[in-house]
Structures are given as C-alpha cells and as structure tokens.
Image: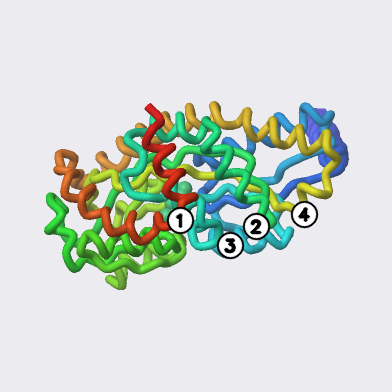
Amino acid sequence: MTLIKTLTGALLASAAFTSAAQACEITLRSSDTHPEGYPTVAAVEHMGELLQERSDGRICVEVFASAQLGEEKDTIEQTQLGVIDLNRVSLGPFNNIIEETKVFSLPYIFRSTDHMHDVVDSDIGQDILDEFQNHNLVGLAYFDGGSRSFYNSQKPIKSIEDVEGLKFRVMQSDVFVDMVDALGGNATPMPYGEVYSSIQTGVIDGAENNWPSYESSGHYEVAGYYTLDQHLIVPEVLVMSKSSWDNLSEDDQALVQQAARDSMPVMRELWAEREAASEAQVLAAGVEVIRDIDKTPFIEAMVPVYERHVTSDKLKDLVTRIQAVE
Ligand code: GTR
C-alpha cells in the first residue's frame, strides 16, 4: 500500500513537473561562471521565478551555473551571436569591446559601495547600459561585485613596494593589465577557471577578487595572503542577446526588463550576507588578511592608467559625472 502510494505520488509529481516544463513557451538560457547558491546565480533564478509568474508560466529562465556554458569572454561572444540568451558577467571583460564600460572598471573610481550603487542607479548607469545595444546586446540590470583586492601565495603585501615583481592574474581587460603594471607587478590576463591551478603550479603568484569569489573559487586554499587594498569596485551586469530580445513581443520585453530590475534589490541583500559568510569561512581557514594598508600610494599610482584609458571627451565626461555623484 505504502509502495503504491509512493509510486502514485512520484508519478503525479513528475506529471506536474512535465506540465510545468511544457507550459514554458520560451526558455531563456542564462550563463554564470559562479556555482549554484552564489548571489548572482540566485538573483537570476529569482528573476526567472518572477518572469514565470508574471507571464502565466510562458517565459522561463534556466541558469547554467559554474561556467557550464564557458568562460566569460567566450560566453559574451556567444550571447552576441544569440547562442546564449542571458549572461551574468562582470563589466571587466566588456572593456575591450564596449569602451564606455571602462569608466566603471577604473581603479578607485568609486569611493564606496554606496557611491557605486548611487551611480549605477542614476542616468549614468542607464547611459552605460544603453551602449550595449550597439554591440548586439541589451543591458538589463546591475549586480554587485563587491570590492576587489589582491591575494597571493608568496607573502603578505603590506605596502605598494611589496607588489613589485609579483605575477597576478587579471580579467581580460587592458585596464587591469595597466593597473597591475602601474603598481609594479606583472599582469597575466586569463580566464577565471584557470586561476586555481595556475597559482597552484606557480605560473602566477596570485590574483585579485572580492570575498565571495576568493572563497567560492577556493583560491584562498592556494593563495593565503589577502590584502584589502580594495583597488576596484566593478559592478556586474545581466545582459541579453539582442537577437533573443528581438524575438520577444514588446510586452514580453517589458516583463523581462522589469523582472531583471526587480532582482537587483534581492541581489544586494544576498550579496551583503554572502560577503560576511565568505569572510568568516576564509578567516576560519587561516588566511592572513592585511587590513590596515595605506591606500594613498595605490591611488596615486593609478594616474597613468586614467591618462591611458580616459582619452575621449565622452569618457572624460562620464568620469566627471561619476565623481560628481555625492
Ligand atoms: C568575479 C565576478 C565574475 C568574474 C570573476 C573573475 O568576482 O563575479 O563575473 O568576473 O570575478 O575574476 O573573472
């Protein structure tokens, strides 16, 4: 009897699942380099739930976590081509494709996370999102990426002099290569997924990232010195393929846009929780964290990076507008 009940229950459950799955007329495939449970992944899943509910089950989102669809640079190309519908990525890998995104990737451009939020929530944020349209993409929403700091396997970095000669992986953007060079280190651009083994085998000495990525990638296991110089606060974005967007009716486009926007406050909350949890986990593992570093020499060293990358009037104007946000 119990077995029959269980079997019937299982059959009913699978029938319900099948009909729910069948109800999705449109399934948007979404890429993320982070694992299940990471705030960006959870935020896009939340967006999918909102979308499914508001479209009476017609539009669904399927998130492929843990770089199942590829590393960020490749998935951006695939999204431009319409092979991937949605992509949650850092702005960094867009720098070499969409010039205007550089202004949000400049070291020390944001004074704090609050400043970054105020800027991305303003018309400046919208102006940058609008630029994606010229590159076969639609910019939907901003997510948090915390502040990024250096970690390495060799020694505690206590001053700018300690950076000299260290080899750091950076995201694939010329801004970040120049940033590390300006600090006296050697920069190696490489995909995120190769960093762990590259540190382990000594190809590089370290990398730079925020607490949640440092923790979830396991980089802290191979690079146990983390210096909170906080050189970057790079917002992350959720973008959609322009061709997938164009396949939607105007009403459905509005639903997608609104659900993406509504996932932002949820993401911010999840981010704050995860930052604290990741820090606690990494500290418990015995990582040496250098907190009281003098950032002034780091900030001063960035002048040539700004000179090299902020050349057009358009970028200069964007930088002035960002700095003017209180
Ligand atoms: C993470 C970010 C990812 C990716 C990664 C990296 O903080 O969330 O999108 O850009 O850093 O360093 O490649």
First in sequence: mark 2 vs mark 3: 3
Q: Amino acid at mark 4?
A: Ser
Residue at mark 2: 135
Q: Are marks 2 and 1 in contact (CB under 8 Å)?
A: no
- What amino acid type should be assigned to the residue bearing mark 3? Gly
Query: Which of pointers 4 and 2 lies earlier in the amino acid sequence?
Result: 2
* Amino acid, disc 2: His
Q: Is residue 183 left or right of residue 36?
A: left
Q: Are marks 4 and 3 in contact (CB under 8 Å)?
A: no
Number of residue marks = 4
Instruction: Give the label on residue 70, or none.
Output: 3
Q: State the CA–CA distance, disc 4 to disc 1.
A: 30 Å
**Callout in the foreground (4, 1):** 1
Query: In the visual, does 290 lie left or right of 242?
Result: left
**Quadrant that contains the N terminus:** top right
Q: Residue at x 62, y 51 (%)?
A: 132
The answer to whether the residues at label 4 and label 2 have Cβ atoms under 8 Å apart is: no
Q: Position of residue 247 (x, y in %)?
A: 83, 49
Judge the density around disc 4: few (<14), some (14-19), many (≥20) Cα neighbours within 10 Å.
some
The residue wearing badge 4 is 243
The amino acid pointed to by label 1 is Ser
Give the x, y percent position of residue 4: 84, 33
